[in-house]
Image (cartoon, rainbow, N blue to C red):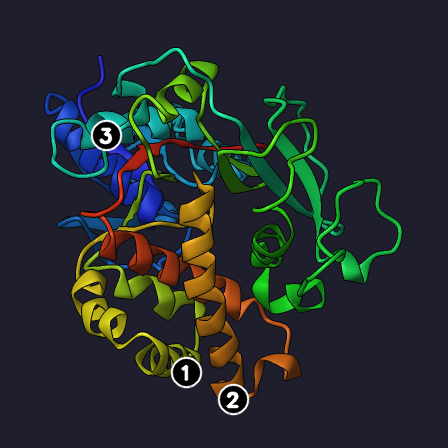
């Protein structure tokens, strides 16, 4: 019988799993967190200690592995090397179910799965961004026919088996080194919102996914889109401590962050004024993935890309003088700002985020 738990990991996934277990399964107390090294990890998380693997003497606790699942095999190897034998992998599907249960009953982040199902299916067109250097998936997955793979940063690769590319029409494919999957979002905005989706009539909803990260949307959920007049579907937010300001400090130099703040203040002072309050809370919309009404996507992209373009101009070095993914990271922060700013005037639904490996 499980007496106590230790969570492997000390970042947002681990913190979310810890909070969910504490709320949903109080009979299984969480003792603390375990990591291979404390370097780049906190000493405390969620009020609990974080220990290094080689210093942990108690081998009897059950360990919940709460990290991205492509790291699980290596972690299992390390645990077994140090004599740990009781462990459970919290893959992205288990994480999604945990976070849905955790947020249920709150007045924020409502689940699409719990909304009323209708009888009318929406036309959906979602693009799954894949860069030509991305590693092939180990497993094969059956995906809905409304998900269309697209070559991201296609300007860098003439040889690509994906027929849909982000370097056609009006595009910024050549900026993929900084914009990451956002070059696909730009291409969708400029070339598809008023056009047709492959294999369907004009779409009601458009979306962006990664080839390793998708949203948990079933065919039943598709019947909930129009029935509930959903404006946008976002993944459950990741949870950060002490707040989401912590997220960008791990990925971005302060000078790039300040360039974005200056661009935001210049172009949208009302959002700039709201940003400090949003940054001071723990919830963050990660990964730049979502599905939205075409009108909502149009409004968001019309707001987002001028801010990013101005950020490139204000950055040191400027955006066109570098290739370090910084615009993609800033995009996650701006997505969080935009949809939390509009959480009262948009009908936002949430779902789990699955990782494909």
Label 1 vs 2, first from the N-terminus: 1
Return the residue at label 3: 5
**Of residues 38 and 168, which is closer to you in this image?**
168
Secondary element type, mark 2: loop
Q: Are marks 1 and 3 in contact (CB under 8 Å)?
A: no
Residue at the spot x=33%, y=30% of the render?
64
Q: Is residue 112 above or below residue 181?
A: above
Q: Earlier in the sequence, mark 1 or mark 3?
A: 3
Q: Nearer the viewer, mark 2 or mark 3?
A: 2
Whether residue 157 can be seen here = yes
SS at mark 3 in the image: strand
Mark closest to the chain's N terminus, 2 or 3 = 3
- Residue closer to the observer: 350 or 302: 302
Q: Quadrant of residue 290?
A: top left
Left of 319 or right of it: where is 133?
A: right
The residue carrying pointer 1 sits among few (fewer than 14), some (14 to 19) or many (20 or more) residues within 10 Å by Cα, namely: many
> Does the image show residue 60?
no
Q: Which residue is drawn at the image coordinates 65% and 38% (left, top)?
A: 196
Q: Residues within 10 Å of mark 2 (few under 14, many from 20)?
A: few
Q: Residues within 10 Å of mark 3 (few under 14, many from 20)?
A: many
Residue bearing the label numbered 1: 259
Q: CA distance from mark 1 to mark 2?
A: 8 Å
Residue position marked by numbered label 2 in the rendering: 316
Q: Nearer the viewer, mark 1 or mark 3?
A: 1
Against 5, residue 67 (above or below) is: below
Which element carries disc 1, helix, strand or loop? helix
Image point (56%, 46%), residue name: 193
Tell me: 349 left or right of 89.
left
Q: Is residue 335 left or right of residue 68?
A: left
């Amino acid at each position: 019988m499980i007496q106590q738990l230790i969570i492997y990991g000390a970042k947002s996934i681990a913190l979310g799993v810890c909070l969910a277990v504490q709320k949903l399964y109080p009979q299984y107390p969480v003792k603390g967190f375990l990591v291979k090294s404390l370097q780049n990890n906190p000493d405390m998380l969620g009020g609990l200690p974080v220990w290094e693997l080689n210093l942990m003497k108690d081998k009897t606790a059950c360990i919940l592995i709460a990290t991205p699942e492509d790291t699980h095999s290596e972690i299992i190897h390390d645990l077994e090397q140090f004599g740990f034998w009781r462990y459970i992998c919290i893959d992205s599907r288990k994480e999604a179910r945990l976070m849905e249960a955790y947020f249920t009953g709150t007045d924020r982040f409502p689940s699409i799965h719990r909304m009323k199902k209708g009888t009318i299916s929406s036309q959906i067109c979602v693009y799954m961004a894949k860069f030509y250097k991305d590693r092939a998936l180990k497993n094969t997955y059956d995906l809905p026919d409304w998900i269309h793979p697209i070559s991201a940063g296609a300007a860098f690769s003439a040889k690509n088996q994906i027929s849909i590319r982000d370097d056609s029409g009006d595009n910024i494919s050549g900026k993929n080194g900084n914009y990451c999957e956002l070059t696909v979002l730009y291409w969708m905005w400029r070339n598809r919102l008023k056009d047709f989706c492959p294999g369907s009539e004009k779409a009601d909803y458009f979306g962006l996914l990664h080839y390793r990260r998708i949203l948990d949307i079933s065919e039943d959920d598709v019947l909930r889109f129009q029935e509930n007049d959903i404006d946008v579907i976002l993944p459950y937010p990741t949870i950060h401590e002490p707040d989401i300001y912590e997220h960008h400090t791990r990925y971005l130099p302060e000078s790039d962050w300040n360039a974005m703040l200056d661009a935001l203040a210049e172009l949208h002072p009302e959002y700039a004024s709201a940003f400090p309050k949003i940054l001071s809370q723990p919830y963050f919309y990660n990964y730049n993935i979502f599905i939205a009404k075409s009108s909502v996507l149009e409004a968001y992209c019309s707001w987002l890309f001028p801010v990013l373009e101005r950020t490139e101009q204000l950055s040191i070095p400027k955006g066109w003088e570098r290739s370090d993914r910084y615009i993609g990271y800033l995009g996650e922060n701006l997505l969080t700002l935009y949809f939390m700013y509009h959480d009262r005037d948009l009908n936002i639904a949430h779902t789990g985020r699955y990782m494909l490996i």
